[in-house]
């Protein structure tokens, strides 16, 4: 689906980038811009800048940049279209559907109806929980220690025992059987009458919200001992359990220095009620890379707080490498006496839990202690096996500093010669060295390929930010000197701006280059002023060298492409004259 340029631009212009980004980090006015701590990486000194005039942001520390659309794409894990719809709704802009295909119109309509059905159902479930005939359900939640405020905060409810209670309620509102079945709230019998009945009948209901706080699915728990104990909505166009975390719609605004990952609905709710609003849980599925990517957008550190039984420990061991692969710092907390978070909080309270969380051991120590439980260290042969496996754990870590620290700590804790343990770690390391070397070579090649591209971006940024000097070199430059696509268009816009002394029109770049990577380049060029070139003589030298380099690259490219004899002669002459190029920055 593609929205017209004028629609996207209207949404972008009416969306206050300063106001929106201020919801994620505090911004202070400084000159013509706003500055604050970067919401994309940890820092103590503000390096994040927002230009209200250009409607762009840029971090001088980590290089993140873009417009209000890409900001929300990165922070909220939304697609371009999802952000457009979100901002349109936020600014009360009606999206005209006349330019959409019939299929897109139908999908939008269906999505809206499904959201309406789920919202209606959530209200119905919540009302049912408060009904006198369902006092057993409400008593269950109150006996678990939840307050009425918490029950309301999470929108908890109850599905009546009657097998088609909700169905009849929604049918009265005019929804079709086909749409009700697609909502995931109902099942259809396989007998001749093919009766439709409520999927969650007789269960406590936990609404599942997306990041914009819309109900997209439900979880249900039985009150008796029947199976399955927990039941989730099936996946559909609204709900993908591998990319959703329960409680994230609240946790994302917690401002906490770390997030807490638990196993179930009640653990999340109990932790939030106790004051740990940064707690989330996966939804009836194993922890996935999609979950880790979602967490990465909102935090840099995760404490895994799974049940301390065997299943919980195995789940933690599976989650660790997934979280680490996204660059997240990981700690693992196993509660004493095999309690789950809900039970522990009831017994020991907030301060005790907070102390445990803040003192939680690193994922490496958790792995080491888990291995230790498999062996009797009083037996030499078993201690050798334990230390060998522990060395293997360290060998897998990418940070040599981390390896060195833990090598010393583990050697001291288990009374093993540090050099011997290091040699064992290196043996494991060497086993995977060939793969790492190949990967490193590939990364080096990629960086080398990107270096020319990076030079172009830096040069364009300096052309834009030093227009007085840029006007002296524009006669020697053409947009064709730059890669097709974004860099070509940026070069063309900047050269035209130097000529006309007019600001660049951002509308074109917003609508034609919506991807986060593209907007990052745009914001770098238009906001990032390279302080290395405050020395005018150095800046002039840089500009001259880049003009010479770009002309030479273009000439060599054309020499390979053209078969026109006259053009070849002209190109060879131009190439020879390049060595004599001298740009007069004083007289022009």
Image (tube, rainbow, N blue to C red):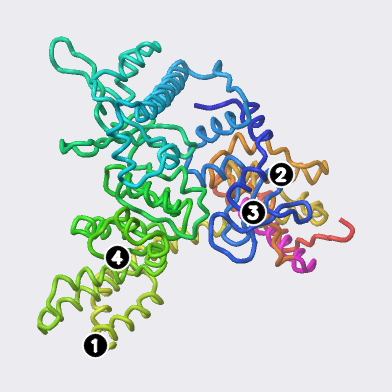
| Front one among 220 and 460 | 220
Q: Nearer the viewer, mark 3 or mark 2?
A: 3
8 w.r.t. 570: above or below: above
298 w.r.t. 384: above or below: above
CA gap between label 4 and label 3 equals 44 Å
CA gap between label 1 and label 4 equals 32 Å
- Dot 4 alpha-carbon crowd within 10 angstroms: few under 14, some 14 to 19, many 20 or more: few
- Dot 1 alpha-carbon crowd within 10 angstroms: few under 14, some 14 to 19, many 20 or more: few
- Given the current orientation, which residue lies at the most extreme right position? 587
- Dot 2 alpha-carbon crowd within 10 angstroms: few under 14, some 14 to 19, many 20 or more: some
Tell me which numbered mark, 1 or 4, is placed earlier along the sequence.
1
Tell me which numbered mark, 3 or 2, is placed earlier along the sequence.
3
429 w.r.t. 182: above or below: below
Give residue 236's position: percent from left, percent from top: 33, 29
**What's the residue at 33%, 26% (across, down)?**
132
CA gap between label 1 and label 3 equals 49 Å
Pointer 4: what residue?
Answer: 435
Pointer 1: what residue?
Answer: 415
Visible residue check, residue 121: yes
**What's the residue at 33%, 50% (across, down)?**
267
């Amino acid at each position: 689906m593609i929205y017209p340029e004028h629609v996207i631009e209207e949404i972008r212009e009416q969306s206050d980038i300063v106001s929106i980004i201020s919801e994620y980090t505090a911004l202070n006015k400084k000159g013509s811009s706003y500055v604050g701590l970067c919401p994309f990486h940890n820092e103590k000194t503000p390096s994040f800048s927002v230009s209200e005039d250009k409607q762009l942001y840029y971090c001088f520390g980590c290089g993140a940049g873009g417009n209000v659309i890409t900001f929300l794409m990165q922070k909220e894990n939304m697609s371009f279209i999802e952000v457009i719809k979100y901002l349109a709704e936020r600014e009360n802009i009606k999206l005209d559907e006349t330019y959409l295909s019939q299929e897109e119109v139908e999908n939008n309509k269906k999505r809206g109806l499904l959201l309406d059905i789920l919202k209606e159902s959530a209200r119905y479930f919540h009302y049912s929980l408060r009904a006198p005939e369902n006092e057993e359900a409400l008593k269950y939640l109150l006996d678990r220690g939840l307050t009425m405020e918490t029950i309301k905060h999470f929108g908890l409810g109850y599905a009546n025992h009657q097998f088609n209670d909700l169905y009849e309620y929604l049918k009265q509102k005019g929804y079709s059987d086909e749409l009700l079945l697609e909502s995931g709230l109902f099942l259809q019998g396989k007998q001749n009458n093919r009766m439709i009945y409520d999927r969650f009948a007789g269960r406590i209901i936990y609404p599942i919200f997306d990041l914009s706080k819309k109900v997209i699915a439900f979880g249900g728990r039985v009150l008796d001992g029947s199976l399955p104990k927990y039941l989730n909505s099936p996946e559909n166009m609204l709900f993908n359990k591998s990319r959703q975390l329960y409680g994230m719609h609240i946790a994302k605004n917690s401002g906490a220095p770390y997030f807490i990952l638990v196993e179930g609905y009640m653990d999340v709710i109990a932790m939030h009620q106790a004051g740990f609003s940064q707690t989330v849980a996966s939804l009836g599925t194993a922890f996935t890379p999609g979950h880790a990517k979602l967490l990465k957008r909102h935090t840099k550190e995760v404490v895994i707080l799974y049940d301390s039984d065997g299943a919980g420990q195995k789940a933690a061991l599976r989650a660790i490498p997934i979280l680490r692969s996204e660059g997240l710092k990981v700690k693992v907390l196993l509660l004493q006496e095999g309690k789950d978070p809900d039970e522990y909080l009831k017994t020991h309270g907030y301060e005790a839990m907070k102390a445990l969380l803040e003192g939680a051991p690193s994922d490496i120590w958790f792995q080491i202690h888990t291995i230790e439980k498999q062996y009797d260290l009083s037996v030499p042969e078993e201690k050798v096996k334990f230390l060998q496996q522990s060395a293997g754990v360290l060998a897998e870590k990418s940070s040599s500093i981390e390896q060195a620290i833990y090598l010393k700590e583990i050697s001291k804790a288990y009374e093993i010669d540090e050099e011997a343990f290091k040699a064992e770690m290196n043996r494991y390391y060497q086993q995977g060295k060939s793969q790492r070397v190949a990967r490193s070579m590939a990364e080096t090649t990629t960086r080398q390929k990107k270096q020319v591209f990076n030079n172009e971006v830096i040069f364009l940024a300096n052309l834009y930010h030093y227009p007085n000097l840029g006007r002296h070199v524009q006669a020697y430059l053409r947009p064709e000197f730059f890669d097709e696509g974004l860099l070509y268009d940026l070069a063309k816009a900047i050269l035209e701006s130097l000529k006309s002394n007019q600001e660049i029109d951002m509308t074109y770049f917003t609508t034609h280059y919506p991807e986060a990577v593209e907007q990052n380049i745009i914001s770098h060029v238009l906001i990032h002023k390279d302080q290395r070139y405050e020395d005018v003589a150095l800046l002039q030298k840089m500009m001259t060298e880049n003009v010479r380099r770009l002309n030479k690259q273009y000439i060599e490219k054309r020499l390979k492409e053209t078969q026109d004899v006259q053009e070849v002669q002209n190109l060879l002459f131009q190439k020879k004259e390049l060595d004599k190029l001298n740009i007069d920055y004083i007289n022009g």
